Image (spheres, rainbow, N blue to C red):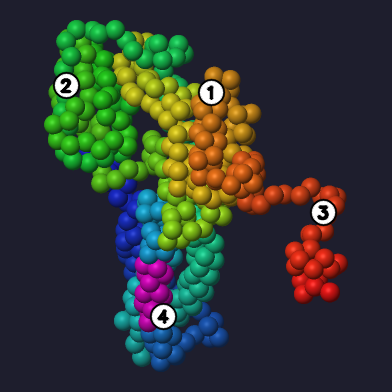
Amino acid sequence: MSWAARFELRQYLKTSLWVVPLVGGVLGGLLAQATLWLDGVVRLPPDWNYSASTASGVLTAIAGAMVALLGFVVTIGVLVVQQATGTLSPRYMRLWYRDRLQKGVLATFAGTFTFAFGLLRRIEDDFVPDIGVTLAGVAVAASLGLLLIYLDRFTHRLRPVAVAALVRQSGLDVLEDWTAQIRARAPDEGDAAAAPPRRGPVWHVPAERFGTVQAVNLDGLIAVAEAHDCVVVLRRTVGDFVTPGAVLVEVEGSGWPPAPQLHRLFAFGRERTIEQDPAFALRILVDIAIKALSPAINDPTTAVQVLDHIEGFLEALSRTELRTRYALRGSDEKTRLVIPGRSWEDYLQLAVTEIREYGATSTQVCRRLRALLEALLRAAPADRRLAVEQELARLTATVDAVFLDPDRRALAQLSDRQGLGGRMIPSGTVVPPTRQRDGFGGRNGDRRGP
């Protein structure tokens, strides 16, 4: 099996909701057979023995309850999909499908069902699986405990701020792994080293299928380039959608590896995935924020909370070495693979442009976005501050164009890390009483006059 096929299989297993429950059901049936054998060789004390009718009733109730709970969890899953796609982002569902607790709950229910059914069919007048009935009761208790944990977890995890925290952490983990893999192979000279001189003829390798590039086997491409003494230059990278015939890679040098050998080092799928693609995590965060800013939802506070996690992601990016092109070396210390990358400006524009445009009329969003950019201006290295200053200038121009009233414009130009949207009065400040507005000159704010 090729590397691409293994990667696609892993992706399928991670997102499938039936494989782990099926394994749980099979294990439950096998455990029932093992328990029946144990009941034949071990005798429990009389207090632990069950009558045939009692054991049959208990196991029948357990089997029926597990089927009902399976249907209940599936119903919850359908509701989660509807809510997440309607109020969060459809792209988030790829992460939700991977949750191990959900699969563990389904597997436990399926295993308990097959375990109880396997025991039920062996009950006779002269044989009752006493150990099995006891274990079935323990399994029910464990199933109910997992169900409560499942409900508690997803009740809290469906909040936008919890989703944003999960996506941010997933993106940072991918960023760390990806940069470590690149750093182990890339030279230290920067972008100048990422453009090696031409080494003979150039061969264009076209793609053979529709799909989004989900992952690339960098070590495999470097090994192929070393074996054929050539340089492989990627023209499509992780996250790009390609069509058949589009140039996937260019091979520079006298030795050209077979095209199928290169194709097997690219994993394709229907949509982007977060592996090797930290920008996809940022894309999900932005999607959640701009959906909250849509007229149908109109929830700028959610957008402000998402900006908190976008700020954390950008601060980590500001300390990460980023290049527009990476030249990766082989074991012979020669450049063997050139891949495109994303610059600091690319990530920054992705993070703030659409939120600025869709949240231009929200004082909360404008103020929190300004606080985000000012924090980046302090945290980012000197060579990356110009891009932040440019985004600050764009934000100022947007506020000037949208807020025509001078007072509202001045309020929207303030920096506010909490995104409250109103003027914050420092503690201890004496606020003068409101002038009488009833036109009668009365005192103490009598709106009816004297």
Identify residue type, mark 2: His
Query: Does the residue at mark 3 contact the one at mark 1 (Cβ under 8 Å)?
Result: no
Q: Which residue is mark 2?
A: 204
Query: Does the residue at mark 4 contact the one at mark 1 (Cβ under 8 Å)?
Result: no
Please name whichever residue, 280 or 101, is drawn nearer the observer in this view of the structure.
280
Quadrant location, the N terminus: top left
Q: Which residue is mark 4?
A: 65
Nearest to N terminus: mark 2 or mark 3:
2
In the visual, does 287 lie left or right of 420?
left
Near mark 4 (Cα within 10 A), the count class, few <14, some 14-19 or many ≥20, is some
Q: Quadrant of residue 225?
A: top left
Identify residue type, mark 1: Leu
Query: What are the residue bounds of the magenta stretch?
Result: 63-80
Q: For mark 1, give the secondary structure.
A: helix
Nearest to N terminus: mark 2 or mark 4:
4
Q: Which mark is residue 386?
A: 1
Q: Which residue is mark 3?
A: 431
**Residue at 61% over, 41% down:** 413
Nearest to N terminus: mark 4 or mark 3:
4
Identify residue type, mark 4: Ala
* Callout in the foreground (2, 1): 1
Query: Does the residue at mark 2 contact the one at mark 4 (Cβ under 8 Å)?
Result: no
Quadrant location, the C terminus: bottom right
Nearest to N terminus: mark 2 or mark 1:
2
Measured in 3D between alpha carbons, the distance from the residue under mark 4 to the one under mark 3, in whole angstroms, is 63 Å
Please name whichever residue, 9 or 370, is drawn nearer the observer in this view of the structure.
370
x then y, percent, for residue 248: 21, 28
Q: Is 8 inside the magenta-drawn segment?
A: no
Q: For mark 4, give the secondary structure.
A: helix
* Callout in the foreground (4, 3): 3
Near mark 2 (Cα within 10 A), the count class, few <14, some 14-19 or many ≥20, is some
